[in-house]
Image (cartoon, rainbow, N blue to C red):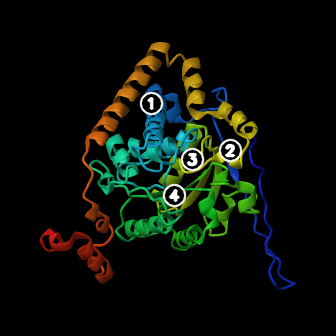
Amino acid sequence: MPPAPDLHMTAISGEAEASPVARFEIRYSRYLDESGKALRSLPDFARDKAELVALYKAMVLARAFDAKAMALQRTGRLGTFASALGQEAVAVGLAAAMRAEDLLLPSFREHGAQLWRGVSPYELFLFWGGDERGSAFSQSHDFPICVPVATHVPHAAGVALSFKLRHEPRVAVAVFGDGATSKGDVAEALNVAGAWRLPVVFVVNNNGWAISVPRVQQTAAETLAQKAIAAGIDGEQVDGNDVVAVREATGRALEKARRGGGPHLVEAITYRLGDHTTADDASRYRPDAEVSPHWAQDPIARLRRHLVDRDWWQKADEERLIAEAAATIEEAAGRYLATPPQPAETMFEYTYERLPQDLARQRERALGPAADTAG
């Protein structure tokens, strides 16, 4: 994928005698090409075998979860699911850059990040199976999955404001897609984050498609990263299929925000290899001839080739990893399938601390006499 051109914007005031010039550039970075070859000197963490292997294992586990979730949905045992096939480097890279005390606000394609940060595959299966107990993470303080597009992005600004008011060296990280950048929620969150210099990092998972709407029909902006510039925020692009690039850029942005340097936006350019969700059929609007070439940019194969070239990964390692990942996911899926569903009345829970009167009346009608003893 070629780097985006440097962009220079000129702002002209309304007065003829004053013509201030505002100039900015959109940086694009990647470290590994499609064959896994290093294009330049690698950052320190990528010189450590253990760190690179951990990134690779996390992407493989994320893909194993993805495949099992798809299989469960296709056989009627899971709800609508959003695959992250081919986009694992975005989620894993940003999660690896975060500290444990930071806070992730994911959208619906970040299970790779959630698994890295302590959410269990079992909890994720519960959530996608329609059971809100899957959002009661036992080992994570992060926000739950946000299915509505972009509504969690202002929440990230609010979380970051709380960190700033409490003088906590923590950063909020919001992840959302290219389609979300066309919504007012994102513009408003960027604006307030820039105005108040909040410790928040925005990561745009630009996979090229907002369901059936291609990126070029969403906005006339040459990059999505430049939308941050208008809010007084630094924005940059990375190769979203290069986990090293995602990890490096997000880590740099996090440390800047942690030091009081304000927010940052990272546009990770990747591609959606599958359907938008299991409720979508992308073949109706996207020919195979367009999709097929993007398989050559597979982030997992790219890092594997890099590890093999450095003699850090062998066939036996791969076989062992595939078996371990499959066992982990199968165990979680079995536990999920064996979990009894919650009673129907739980549809009234998980949203309000105290039910509004209209919903309380609906609950009473649904339960009948049992409502009096249910509390």
Within-10-Å neighbours for mark 1: few <14, some 14–19, many 20+? many
Check the picture and name the quadrant holding the N terminus.
Answer: top right
User: Which image quarter is the C terminus in?
Assistant: bottom left
Circle 1 — which element? helix
Q: Position of residue 16 (x, y in %)?
A: 87, 84
Q: Which residue lies most toward the bottom here?
A: 15
Q: Earlier in the sequence, mark 1 or mark 3?
A: 1
Tag nearer the camera, 4 or 2: 2
Local crowd at mark 3 within 10 Å, few (<14), some, or many (≥20)?
many
Q: What numbered label is drawn on residue 283? A: 2
Q: Which residue is mark 3?
A: 249
Q: Indicate which disc, 2 or 1, sits on the residue closer to the N terminus.
A: 1
State which tag comes first along the sequence, 3 or 2. 3
Q: Residue at x 53, y 73 (%)?
A: 192
* Proximity of marks 3 and 2: CB atoms separated by less than 8 Å: no
Q: Amino acid at mark 1?
A: Lys
Q: What percent of the width, then of the height, locates residue 104?
A: 42, 55
- The CA span between labels 4 and 2 is 34 Å
- On screen, residue 142 versus residue 6, left or right, reads left
> Is residue 306 left or right of 294 when viewed as pictured?
left
Determine the image quadrant of residue 42.
top right
- On residue 57, the disc is 1
Look at label 4 and name its amino acid.
Val
Q: Residue at x 47, y 25 (%)?
A: 49
Give the Cα distance between marks 3 and 2.
33 Å
Residue under label 4, please give it: 201
Query: Tag 3: residue type?
Result: Ala
Identify which residue, 128 or 135, lies in the foreground. Answer: 128
- Label 2 sits on what residue type? Ser
> Is residue 39 visible to us here?
no
Q: Nearer the viewer, residue 150 or 368?
A: 368
